[in-house]
Amino acid sequence: MTAAGNHQASRPVGRRLERAGIRDVAAAAGVSITTVSDALNGKGRLPDATRRHVREVADRLGYRPSAAARTLRTGRSGLIGLTVTTYGEEPFTFTEFAYFAEMARAATSAALARGYALVILPASSRHDVWGNVALDGTVVVDPSDHDPVVTELVRQGVPVVSDGRPAGSLPVHAWVDNDHEEAVLGILDHLAAAGARRIGLLTGTSTDTYTRLSTTAYLEWCERIGQEPVYEAYPAHDPCAGAVAADRLLARPDRPDAVYGLFDPNGTDLLAAARRYGLRVPDDLLLVCCSESTGYAATEPPITTLSLKPRRIGTAVVQLLIDAIEGVGPAHPVQQVMPTELIIRTSSQRRPHRTTVSPPRTPARGEG
Amino acid sequence: MTAAGNHQASRPVGRRLERAGIRDVAAAAGVSITTVSDALNGKGRLPDATRRHVREVADRLGYRPSAAARTLRTGRSGLIGLTVTTYGEEPFTFTEFAYFAEMARAATSAALARGYALVILPASSRHDVWGNVALDGTVVVDPSDHDPVVTELVRQGVPVVSDGRPAGSLPVHAWVDNDHEEAVLGILDHLAAAGARRIGLLTGTSTDTYTRLSTTAYLEWCERIGQEPVYEAYPAHDPCAGAVAADRLLARPDRPDAVYGLFDPNGTDLLAAARRYGLRVPDDLLLVCCSESTGYAATEPPITTLSLKPRRIGTAVVQLLIDAIEGVGPAHPVQQVMPTELIIRTSSQRRPHRTTVSPPRTPARGEG
DNA sequence: CGATCATGCAGAAACCTTCCTTCGGGGTGG
DNA sequence: CCACCCCGAAGGAAGGTTTCTGCATGATCG
C-alpha cells in the first residue's frame, strides 16, 4: 500500500481521475501495447517473466480494461438481457412475483458463473434503451404472441431463449418450459384421489401459454372424467380481481369441493373466501394453488402448492442461451421441458392431522 | 403490416446478417457520416428536410447505432449496476425477497424512464464480471462495512448511491433509508396503546444497519418505558431459523404478550408458533412484522405489517444516482430519509371485529 | 460591390482495445 | 557459411461512433 502510494504520488492527480489505459501500462512496463494485451489475456507467446511483470505493473496502476473498447473490438459484451412481459407501466407483474424473483435469482447466478451479467429490460420499454445496450443474447420470460422486441432481436441475429413456450411463430433459439398439462393432470388426479367430486379452477383471462395450456388440460380432464367444468377466469395482473374471482367461484350454485388456482395469490384468496362461506379446509374444500411462496407452509391450514421450480428453469434458460452465444450448443432449436413438483400439504388431504402443540419445524427438510 | 413487409422484401438476406453501420446509412442517403450522426441525434445545424431524409434511410436499413462504439466515444453506457448483498452463493436473500423485488421493480422503472437500464451484480461476484461491464453508476443495497467492490468503484470515480445507510466510512455519493428508529418506536407505541404489557422482538444476528438501528431503538424504548427487553435473535438469511426463533420466543417463561418481527417471514412463523402454544391472536398475543408481502392481508387473522415502501426507496435511489451521473444534483452527499407505513390489521388490535361471511374485498382500495 | 456572416455539410481525430501480420535475432542442421 | 525456424515482441489496422474544426456557398449589409 505505502509503496504503491509512493509510486503513484508522481502522477498528476487532477480533480477528475484519469483512468489508466493499456497505453499507460505499456509505457510503465517498457513494452508494447500488444505485449500488455497478450500478457493480460493469456494469449500470444510470452515468457512467464514478461507476463508477470506486465501484470504487476497493471495492478500497480490499477488498470482496468475498458469494457466498451473490448466489446467494440470483440463483439462480445458479456451482457444478457432479461426481458419480462409487462402489464401496464411496471416491469413485472404481481402474480409472477415469487416465481420471477426466484427465477431471476437463479438466472443471475448461472450467468455470473459463466462470466455474464444480467440486464433487466422490460419488453415494452422505450426502444432507445434497448438499442443503447449491447446484448450478447436475451432471455425472454413468457413471450407474447408477436413480441416486436423479440422479433427485432432475432432479426438482428441476437440469440433469444425463452422461459415458456413461445406463442405464435416467434423464432426463438430455444425454450424451456414446465410440462403444464402433466402438472395439471397430476393435481386433478391427486384431488380426485383425496375424494374430490367436483374440482373447480381459478384461471386467468390472458392468452399466455401457461394459462392456455393449463386451462385446456383442465377442460380435457373434465371431459374425460365426465365432470362439468367449474371455473372462473380473471385478469391475473390485477391483484384485486383474484379475491373477487375466488369469492365468485365459491358462491356458485354448483360450488366445487376442490379448487386449483393457477396463480400465486389464489391460495390465500381462496382460503379467505372459504372462511367467509364457513367452509372448512380441507374438510369441505380441498385447495391447491401454483405458487413459489414459502408462506403457504405456514397458513392455517398449510396449502398444497405446485412449484414450477423456477430455479431450475432460470438456470437452464441461461445455460442454453450462453451455449448458443458461444456456439457450443447444438445448432438446432432446443426445447427443454422441465418437471414440476407438487408439495402436498394439509389443504389437499382429507384426513388432516389436527395441528396442536407440537415442536417447531426442524431445519431437516432443506430446500431441494 | 403488409405494406412494411412488402417494402423490406428487396433486402438481400444472407445467412449471416451484417448489421448496417453509420457508414452504410451515410452512403445510402448520399451524405456524410457526420450528417447522419447529427441528424439522428438532433445535433448540428441541419435543415429539417435532410434530417427527415436521413432518418428515413436509417429506418429503411434497420440501422441501430452500436452501443459499444457510442459508449467508447461518449464514456456513457446508460447502464446502472444494482448490487445486492449476498449470503453464500445466491445473489439475494430470502428475507429481503418481497422488499427486494419491489424495490428492484421501482428502480427498473425509474431508471428506464430516464433512459438507463439496470444490471444485476451481486457484491461478492467474480471481479472479472464487474470489470467487464461499463457502469455509469451503481445502486448498492445494504452495503456491508467495508465493501471492497464499492470502495473500488468510488475510487474509480463511479457514482454510488446506497439503499440503507452505509456502514462504516463507505464513501457513497448519497444514500436513502427509512427512519428505522421512528418506525420501531411507532410500532411499540401502537402495541402499547393496544394494551401490550410486555413487547418482544424477533431480530437478526447480522450487523447491518437495519437490524442494528431497529434493535437499539427497541432497547432504548424498553429502558425508557421500564420494560425488561424480551427478544430472540437469529441469522436472518436462514429461512428455517426464523421459525425456530419464533417458537423460542413464545416458549420463554417471560413470554411476551406482543411481538414485533423484523423480517418478512416472521409474521407467519409467529402465527404458527402462537397456534402451537394455543395462543389466540390478537387476544393473547399482538403481532406486527415488517413485510411487503400482500399475503398478510389474508392470513387468519390478518397481520399488521410495517411497510418500508420499497418502491419509493427504489425510485429515490435511482433518481439520486442519475442526478449524480448527469451532474444535475448537488455536489455534496445527499442523505434522504423516507417514512415507513404501518398497515394496521387485526393482529395488533385488541377488539377485533370477528371475520364472518362478508363481501369480498373490493378493488376500491388500490395500491398507493 | 466587397466584406461579413449564417448555413449546410464533410474530414478526420479520438475513444481503447484486440489481433493479424511482421520482424529481428539467435540457435541449429546441412 | 548459409538457410531455416522459432521465439519474443512490436506495428498497425479495425471496430463504429461522436464531435471539433473547417470549408464552401449563398445571403445580407454597409
Image (spheres, coloured by chain):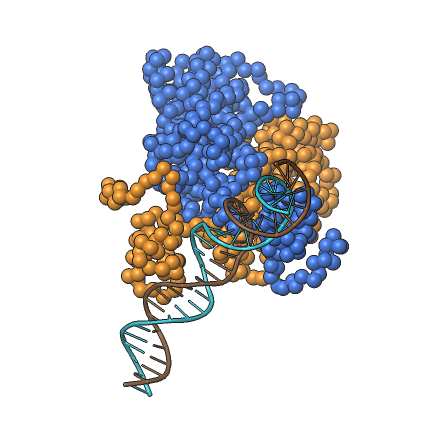
Chain colours: A blue, B orange, C brown, D cyan
Q: Which residue is drawn at 48% across and 21% down?
A: A339
Q: Is B4 placed above or below B71 here?
A: above
- Residue A63, image x and y in percent? 63, 51
Q: Is B115 located above or below residue B84 in the figure? A: below
Q: Position of residue A223 (x, y in %)?
A: 33, 15
Q: Where is residue A277 in the image (x, y as percent from the top left)?
A: 44, 24
Q: Is B104 positioned to the left or the right of B151 in the image?
A: left
Is residue B172 at least partly visible in the picture? no
**Residue B218 horizontal side relative to residue A142, left or right:** right
> Residue at horizontal 39%, vertical 60%?
B34
Residue B253: image quadrant is top right
Q: Quadrant of residue A330?
A: top left
Res A76 visible: yes
Q: Is residue A100 above or below residue B112?
A: above
B240 horizontally vs A145: left or right: right
**Where is residue A353, by image quadrant?**
top right
| A37 w.r.t. A207: above or below | below
Q: Residue at the spot x=62%, y=34% of the render?
A: B89
Spot occupied by residue A141 in the image (x, y as percentages of width and height): 44, 34
- Using the image as rendered, state which of residue B49 and residue B9 is in the foreground: B9
Using the image as rendered, state which of residue A79 and residue A46 is in the foreground.
Answer: A46
Foreground residue among A338 and A274: A338
Near-viewer residue (B333 or C18): C18
